[in-house]
Image (cartoon, coloured by chain):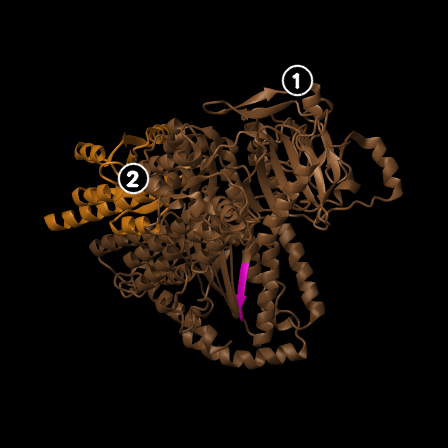
Amino acid sequence: MNTLTTLFVDDEKDFLETILKRMKKRHVNAYGAESGEEALSLLAHTPVDVVVLDIRMPGMDGIETLKEIKKRLPLVEVILLTGHASLEAAREGMESGAFDFMMKPVNIDELLYKLQDAHKNKSIQESKIKHLESKLKR
Amino acid sequence: MTAKVMAPMMKLGGIIKRIFSWGSVNPEEMEKLRLDFKERYAYFKQLISANNKALEIMADIERTLKGERPFGMSFVRSSATTVSANVFQMVKKLQQLAPGRYVGLIPRYDDIENKINWILNEKKQIRDAPLVIPLGSIDKDRVDLVGGKMANLGEIKKNIGLNVPSGFVITSSAYRRFIDHNHLSVEIARQMQLADLYDIENLYELQARLHQLIIESELPRELEDAISDAWRKMEAEAGSGATVAMRSSALGEDEESSSFAGLHLSELNVSADHVIDSYKEIIASKYSLQAITYRLNKGIKDEDIAMCVGCLVMVDAASGGVIYSRNPIDIHDDSVFINATWGLPIAVVDGSVDSDLFVVSREPPLKTIHQDIKEKNKKLVCYPLEGVCRVDLTEDDVRNQPSINEQQAVTLAQMAIRIEDHYGTPQDIEWAISKKGEIHILQSRPLLQMESLKQDLPEGFKAKQKETVILKGGITACPGAACGTVCTVDSGLDILEFPEGAMLLTREAHPRWASLLSRASGIITEHGSFAGHLASVAREFGLPALFSVSGALNKLNNGDQITLDATGRSIHKGRVEYLLNKAKQKECLMIGSPVHETLKAVSRHIIPLNLLEPDDPGFAPENCMTFHDITRFIHEKSVHEMFSFGEGRNFAERSSKQLHYQVPMQWWILNLDDGFIKEVREKYVKLENIASIPMLAFWEGFAAIPWDGPPPLDGKGFMSVVSQSSASTAMTRSLGPKYADRNYIMISKNYCNISSRIGYHFSTLEALVGDQRAENFVSFQFKGGAADSSRRFKRVNFIKSILEEHGFRVETKKDNLISRVEGHERGYMLERIKILGYLTLHTRQIDMIMTNSDKVDYYRSKIKNDIGKIISAPPGAGDS
């Protein structure tokens, strides 16, 4: 599997800084964005495997951002990570195509493991597509 | 064996037979299948991991429900959300494994989710209620609008007719308007969710952030208008330039068991210029360190507390204090206790000065039966324009003079009795006497009385006590005894350093130390009376407290171990056992609290397990009543779906290999992913080539000690086997001789699923063991047997007791056993798997001897010995 590239989207700067630092220590490629809008414009030109999204953000909220990402880049996996404990939000997020829903504060290893799972899903989908393409060519 | 038990075996046997059979496939299709399988395995693993997480949270909820440690609504919400998200994940993954099947799960999930949401979002709302209301039009029935403290005060003014300052209350409806206007509730809940409520440093930061958030918020326009309107009306009555005392009156406050004494802010002598700022400060005090800790320890919901604020015309007091209409620390003493000091009564409640005590007997004619006049070296007075200040008392005759006279004491006692009679319960009353000599009642709330703890120490101990005593005297604020290491607190920052279980020593009995009461073993102060707020809270928590101990700060040193005997009013060197034996246990306050009740209500839709037997016709989506049922159902079906993959397409033959351990074994292995060290081309896979950590542990336990053969039978056991096995041979034959005794294992490096049939019982072991401690789990199911049902049930219970000894959670129903252990580190998990490997072999046929107690004892001790040997053995290949 190629190396994992992630994008963390959170309006809380402190959180973002800390998590990016911790990801780098664990050799995970990690970008940061402070809003849904910023995340979408970054995704337009940067390949990312997994996006980790906060739900409550000013401007575009997490669920809207998630829907937009799934529309533009269906293969990119999205994990919702939020301090907002709500069954409705969890449900809506998962139905809109989120890979998983996690509560803050999150155990960093658990998050890492989840990122790898999401990445694996993406790789499998990609190789299935490749297989299909090569079949069509013949 | 009964037909019912055999049914799933036949089903599984059939499926496995098809998967593991040989056939030819073209490479193109094979590649497609390989990819599909990889995808399914990824879903399956994610499903298992969600299952594991959901069960882990359920176990956490169950532990928390025991009420041994405090928790807040953020715990309730985040656990419910996490379980729900993981169960939904399982539903989703099962649909990916088996599209279009099991759709009946979705309405069940929706229904359970709705029920939980309904419990979590319940709200008390008063619509169209006034934002501000004059004190004169309040009585105790308006408690939902004005909070307990102000409702009581209104009641005293309106229905008892005692003198209460005039003023108005900013209502709970105003509070909600303020919160909604600034969208505070979601943000506050989010901040609370992020904070570690058990870490005091974290709480300290939380308090600062929430304070800031509230202070920076704006009052809605209509609320500001309503307040200035009420202020003008009050000035018309009390004269222009009047100032007020602003008192918090939280909804839910002033109930007998939850006093909230002094935890929220009151601001004295506030002028018109600062009423809005003070209002916000009081709202913010809902999130003071001591208030958060208090609610957490008592299981009170944050969202249930609406902060109402009373604004009462300020009484510039000549003297003031607190009356207890009965003795708070002796339920049999009905005398009235009056604490009084010079100046404002706040000096008594915040414990900053020593106060005079008058005890008035209730028998008519009322008279003072005891008085204790203290030296009062300062008092609190109003500044002319705004605010209060401390004034040192220098003249000897003022310092040592009683702050009220006997006549006043009797009048105060009469008022206290009137209030008590009106409410029918003992009262804790704050009062002030103006410079003109008028008595004002400022507050009244139910008084918590304690059983007195009389000490009858045997004669011998009295002499012994003399050897250990360091200090004597003081006032019992809360009876009891405790031992701890002295820790002096002086500034707010000392709170951060306060160790768990230390003895709190401080100069004044200030309410801000209330945040330490859940961590301290006892409290000792140099000043303060049993009428202060800190004393009230200490009594609520049952924490031994001795106040007003002169010389305590000098005589006691940080780090000294001491024993506090608050009942006997003495402090001792070291640990004095005989004093501690008398002490009561600290009570747990969570059980029955609103937060606990909410968790209990929510857990009813999460935890109970109704679906047990997969072969039961009732094992169906529509019978899933709880999240636990859904996880159980999905887990069972997902294993099934994994096995049935490739059915009819002859897929699994490339990966299924027969285990070769010394000789070829009746164990067939399906490699899901990375379960083999190197690829296997031939028919057999050697044990040395197995990479699956949990499978190797299983095998180690399985092969560790040879089986002694079937237990010697007694006549009855033998008959029982004969009659049962005549039924089961038919079953076995129908499976075909080839498959009857085969065992199947699915593996990856960190996972295994082992279905085995040894003798006449059927067991499934599933395990995930890796470096992710939180992901680790082992689950083990066992059923069946050759003997009659009562012996089989006995064997299941026999196994249950062994598993429980080794840390498993076990449920049994008839001859079916389900057990689980999770969340431990790898070494521990592998030991559990070894035990299961051993038991899989060695419980073989022992159902037959289950009614013979001697033999049961023999096997119990043999198994115990064997397990001891196995888990103390040096780590095997799987442990590296």
Q: Which amino acid type is marked by label 1?
A: Thr
Name the magenta segment's main secondary structure: strand
* Residue located 22% across and 46% down the image: A127
* Part of the protein shown in magenta: B810-814
* Residue located 25% across and 44% down the image: A63
Q: Which residue is mark 1?
A: B394
Neighbour tally class for label 2: few under 14, some 14-19, many 20 plus, Cα within 10 Å:
few
Residue B550 shows in the view: yes
* Residue located 47% across and 29% down the image: B269
Question: Which residue is outermost to the top?
Answer: B394
Discs 1 and 2 carry the same chain letter: yes
Vertical arrangement, residue B640 with respect to residue B446, above or below: below
Vertical arrangement, residue B642 with respect to residue B623, above or below: above
Occupied quadrant, residue A37: top left
Circle on res. B515? none
Chain letter of the residue carrying label 2: B
Vertical arrangement, residue A36 with respect to residue B604, above or below: above
Left or right, B731 with respect to B469, comes to left
Element carrying mark 2: helix
Left or right, B649 with respect to B256, comes to left
Circle on res. B222? 2
Whole-percent x, y for residue B585 in the image: 67, 46
Q: Colour of chain B?
A: brown
Question: According to the colouring, which chain is orange?
Answer: A
Badge count:
2
Question: Which residue is outermost to the left?
Answer: A137
Looking at marks 1 and 2 on the same chain, the residue that comes earlier in the sequence is marked by 2
Occupied quadrant, residue B455: top right
Q: Which amino acid type is marked by label 2?
A: Glu
Chain letter of the residue carrying label 1: B
* Residue located 51% across and 54% down the image: B62
